[in-house]
Image: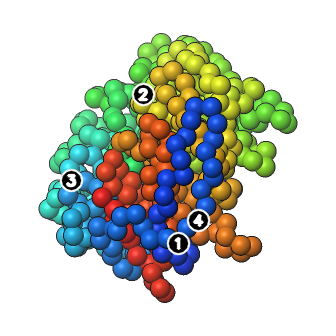
Amino acid sequence: MRKLIAVGVVAVCLALTACSAGSSEPAGQATTTQATSAPVATTEAAKSAAAWSVPDYKGDSSKVAVVGDVVLTPRSTAMVALNRKSGKELWHRERSGGDYNIYWISGPLVVLVDKPENHSGPYLFEVIDVATGSTLWQASADEVSVFDNSVYTADCQKESGRSEHCATMRRDLRDGKSTWVAPATGKVSEAEIGLGSQQANIERPYVAFSVPSPPSDIQWTLLETATGTVLPVRAENRAWYEIAVDNSLIVTDNSDVRGEGSCPVLIEAFDGLSGTGKYSTTVNSGRRKDGECEHSLGPTPTDGFTGSGSRVAAVSDDGSVQLLDLVTGNVVWTSEVKGTALDADDRSLLISEHADQGSLTLVDFATGQRKWTVADPGFTGYPSERTTFVVGDRVVVGGRVPVGEYSAPPVTLVYDRETGRELSRYDGVLAGAGADWIAVGRRDGEKYALEFHG
């Protein structure tokens, strides 16, 4: 059903190159008018030693998470929970080795989803108390969508490799009990605004929901989460992203419909209760340094939008970053900064000169006012994507910095959110970050290790 966007997502076990953890002195304070000097790769001793490290880490970048005193570390065939202070193993779960990185956190609980390789069977999943490692409940389904209060499971009839004809049931996250008397015919969209850090989506009163539309296609509607009622609104399936915002159904078409030289994203909104159209507007996605369109308003390959609440980042016709309110279709502000939004929370929006590389600028989320700009960190461009976290009082960015003709070791940079001053630098892949911790994966001889700082 959905078009796939080609991106360079590289596992730690493939992306890490031989280097030791390190940190440089701050590169200088960023200003609101010009960029600071570009950082370079370093092999100097780290400014602060890691709290602990664990060997034989073969997980994926940006997937480490912290819940209370527990660090969750996905591995190739297991999820391993470690004590935050010591790094000692607390519990683990074996995985099939298919897609081992699907997991979502809601408060003290984690939902592990074991997706078989090549989607050769149903998803197996279990809800676990992170502190104790005990399983609250488990089940299997053809499709699994996780929210902060619920798990939506769908049993589907697959046709031509697609699973459009599904029967979906909402289950309480805590005990797995069904919410409705009977399942709803269709499937939940997983698109969301501001996805990140393995946190489960917030469950709203409505979710975007696909329903069969004979003879062979689907349409989009809204599903009332409390009752399982399918609303009367219907929207054409454009095979891109769909989301519920308040009682509105939002669908996008990210195809190049305006001709060469543009990166259009068509956004249409429908009233969920009456089914009438509310607005139709066209914005633009970001553009890579080579001129190619990103075809996405979110951090690819995630099915989501960069933003917070009902507001998402887009690009104007002249290349300026703007903030769009999906409820009204109105532009809230247009920044003086041109580029592509990489990451955001309700305080700040991180912008890159190009979608895949270039200088970095932080603006205020409410007003679009520039706070600081730092020069291009020197990361390679597409397909080696950057990993970013805007969290707490820091902005953390990971990527690869070329050293010589054939080597591009991974580097993690930490900036002060208020000033843009470089606080720390580590040689290694950015494996996760929070308000007071950073996890870095690095090569340790012939094997790989996970270093935890915090």
Q: Which mark is residue 68?
A: 3
The residue sitting at 36% across, 42% down in the picture is: 392
Q: Which mark is residue 41?
A: 4
Q: Nearer the viewer, mark 4 or mark 2?
A: 4
Q: Nearer the viewer, mark 1 or mark 3?
A: 1
Amino acid residing under circle 2: Gly
Ranked by sequence position, the earlier of labels 4 and 2 is 4
Q: Which residue is mark 1?
A: 43
Amino acid residing under circle 1: Thr
Q: Nearer the viewer, mark 3 or mark 4?
A: 4
**Crowding near pointer 2: few (<14 within 10 Å), some, many (20+)?**
few
The residue sitting at 68% across, 32% down in the picture is: 338
The residue sitting at 16% across, 59% down in the picture is: 131
**Crowding near pointer 1: few (<14 within 10 Å), some, many (20+)?**
some
Ranked by sequence position, the earlier of labels 1 and 3 is 1
Q: Are marks 1 and 4 in contact (CB under 8 Å)?
A: yes
Q: Which residue is mark 2?
A: 309
Mark-to-mark CA distance, 4 and 2: 37 Å
